[in-house]
Amino acid sequence: MSASYPGSSGAGVVVGTQTQENGRVVGERVLDRRQRDPATRPHVAMVGTYDVANFGDLLFPVIARREIEQRLGSFDLTLYSYGAMSPTTWPLHVHPIAQLRHDITGFDLLLLGGGHLIRADTAIAPGYLPSDPVVHHPLGLWLTPVLLATAAGVPVAWNAPSASPDIPATLTPLLAAALDASGYVALRDLPSARILQGYAPNAALHIAPDTAFGVGQLLPEARSDPLESLLVEMGISGRYVVVQPTSQLAPYRQAVCAIVDAAIQEGMSVVELPIGPVHGDEAGILGLPVTTHTPSSWPEPLLLAELLACSQAVVAVSLHAGIVAVVAGVPLFHPPSIPDSKCELLDRISGVYALPRDGSAMQNAFPLGRTEPSVLIREYVARLQHHWDRVTQLVEDSAPRHVPAPVLLGLVELLPHLAGELHSSRMRGEMLQSRLEQSARESEALRMHRVADRLARIRGRLSRR
């Protein structure tokens, strides 16, 4: 059974910057929030890829809202991504990130990420591009917002994103400035911290677990009515296992089939649950030789998390599907992790099993069924409490700020574009130099060949004499 889901093809629609929001005109110079009305509740901006159909990305804001509200009470959370998404058709209300330059002075905190956000490559998701050309791709998702907040005096917290090693050296001054100016920089793994430390040796960097490990506090103790309704809609009345229908599991299909066969023999149903439709997840893609069940529409983040958490086993490549499984004590089967990859952190947790490419290598007995979560989960949750304390402390400690001129924020927004052009120019220069050197080597080789040919002809004439 196949289903199509909204948001699986990339960015949303552009909206104008001169729009009404909370009684003011977005795009005009505005006063600091505390100066406008000291009694208003805190206002937090959060940037990331919340406009794509990918489970983990949509889960981050849900968790952030709960954790911040627990500490600060009622507050406003505004999400920014490449495209605008309406809550009438999407689980989250998302604003276009091109609008952030006009809104930034009204916030008490900028929260960055999480997920694999700190990167310079453009392969975030198929067809995923800014909906406004003024936004740099991909630096407009993370570096530009931090620089804008810094220019406006808004505190910045990094919500445990991860970083790629391919960030060009031409970005070093901007990246170092962004890291040094941020009030709290948390990254989700040591490799990411090592990468960024190379750009800013004096920056204070912290390691925090992926915030999805805090999802357990959002899940009901018993099955919720929405989950029961979803199971009835799919024709499931008892226990079930979940398989992520992704082509990335194709090399392990034999092992996946062995697991679902074992589940069927124990009277369980099999749910094919797309975790990241934006990455091509689609029911039927693995051609499983059993009857499977799939939601007719993509569940909202917490319902999807509950569907995973109430299963008897999860077979997935998704990090965040895996995190939900281990938090709930559900056995997780996933491909072997590459060293220093994001999924490697799951291998330290009990109840996680690597899929072999040869299914016959798997044991006949599969550990299906929920157990007590690993003790590591409790450690991660405790560390996340400290993480969210640090995040919200920035709001409590924030002081009145100056209001920068709009032209300054406009210039700040251009900096990543200029750095990108510098990198491109350097790459073109290096390519040109390489071609010139290759041409010189070929010319020299041709000259030596001609010299050798002339010497051979001279020796031939001398020998005939």
Image (cartoon, grey):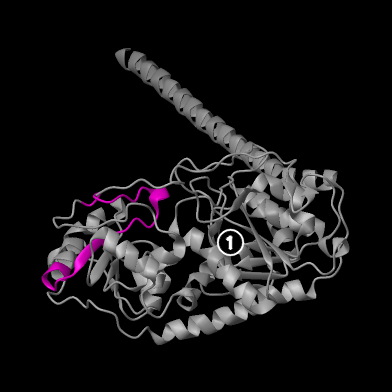
- Residue at image location 45% in from the left, 77% down from the top: 216
Residue 356 at x, y percent in the picture? 22, 65
> Does residue 268 belong to the magenta stretch?
yes
> Does residue 269 belong to the magenta stretch?
yes
Image side of residue 412 versus residue 53, left or right: right
Question: Badge 1 is on which residue?
Answer: 113
- Residue at image location 58% in from the left, 56% down from the top: 48
**Screen quadrant of the C terminus:** top left
The image shows residue 29, relative to residue 367, as above or below, that is: above
Image side of residue 68 versus residue 446, left or right: right
Q: Amino acid at mark 1?
A: Gly
Residue 128 at x, y percent in the picture? 50, 43
Which region of the structure is painted magenta?
Answer: 263-286
Quick check: can you spot residue 340? no
Quick check: can you spot residue 157? yes
Q: Residues within 10 Å of mark 1 (few under 14, many from 20)?
A: many
Residue 449 at x, y percent in the picture? 42, 24
- Residue at image location 33% in from the left, 73% down from the top: 310
Q: How many marks?
A: 1
Secondary structure under tag 1 reads loop
Image side of residue 430 versus residue 219, left or right: right
